[in-house]
Structure formats: C-alpha cells, structure tokens
Image: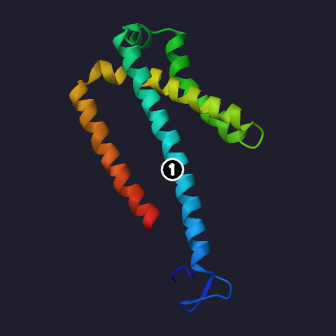
Amino acid sequence: MAWQDPRTTFGQPAVGATAQTDVAFDAGLRSYMLKVYNYMASGVLLTGIVAMLFASSGMAQEVMFGGGPLKWLIILSPLAIVFAMSFGQNKFSTFTLQAMFWGFATLMGLSMSTIFLVYTGASIAQTFFATSAAFLGLSLYGYTT
C-alpha cells in the first residue's frame, strides 16, 4: 500500500492546506539539507588534507608501519568518538558535538593516510570522483522521491 499524504483526502487538498505551506516546507528542507551537505563536504575535505599531509611528511610510514601503541590509538580513536557522539548526543552541547565531529574528521585523516602510501594519486582521485558522482546521483534520487 502506498503512503498517503495526510494533508490530502483521495487526491484532494485538505481544508487549510495551501501551496504556500508547501513552499515554506521545501525552503526549510532545502536550507537544512544544504547545511548537512556543507558540514559533510567540509569534513571530507579536512580528512583528505590531513591524510595527504600526514602521508607526505613521512610520519604515516613511521607510525603506522613501525608498530607501537600510537598506531592503535590512531586506528581506534575514531570509533571511540563515534560511540561518544552517539551515546552523548542528548547530553553534549552543540559546540561539543561539532568539536567532536572535527576531531573525528582529523583522526580519520590520520587513520586513512596509509592509502596515500599504497596507491597512486591518480587512482585515489579516480576513486574519489567516481564515489562523489555516485553519491550525487543517489542523493538527488533520494531528495526528489
């Protein structure tokens, strides 16, 4: 059974439903989605920059392949932040959660820096753009349906 819009009855607008409320709802949703996409794009950009700088400095080779406890701290700390954010989302302030998000993006960059040591820049760029195109297409499909 298909979902029915509660503002309509058998295809007819309900009493009090206007096109103006639909426009306001669409504008609010668009504004919210733009904020979400801006945060996520900024986080991905920060992750990429940190990964590239950490790998090109030579520290990634030293830390990740040299062993030691710092390697495991870098690998497991993003998971700890995800758990802290999900269990504390109602307890933490917005500023704290945003700081944790930026910390997560930075730690993911440190953790993913080994990708730059194993693969070529061209193959990383090709994969990034293919994934971005797929995300764009699926996101547009999800937003419009």
- At label 1, the amino acid type is Leu
Q: Nearer the viewer, residue 141 or 15?
A: 15
- Image: 32 above or below 141: above
Q: Nearer the viewer, residue 53 or 1?
A: 53
Kindly indicate the quadrant of the structure image that contains residue 142: bottom left
Q: Where residue 21 sits: x, y (%)?
A: 62, 73
- Quadrant of the frame with the C terminus: bottom left
Would you say residue 80 is visible in this rendering? yes
Q: Where residue 67 sits: x, y (%)?
A: 45, 9
Q: Where residue 11 sits: x, y (%)?
A: 53, 90
Q: Nearer the viewer, residue 30 or 128?
A: 30
Task: Determine which residue is flagged by label 1.
Answer: 34
- Left or right of 134: which side holds 68? right
Q: Residue at x 33, y 50 (%)?
A: 134
Kindly indicate the quadrant of the structure image that contains residue 31: bottom right
Kindly indicate the quadrant of the structure image that contains residue 41: top left
Q: Residue at x 78, y 39 (%)?
A: 91
Q: Secondary structure at mark 1?
A: helix
Circle 1: is it few (<14), some (14-19), or many (20+) Cα within 10 Å? few
Which residue sits furthest front? Answer: 20
Q: Residue at x 49, y 34 (%)?
A: 43
- Left or right of 59: which side holds 122? left
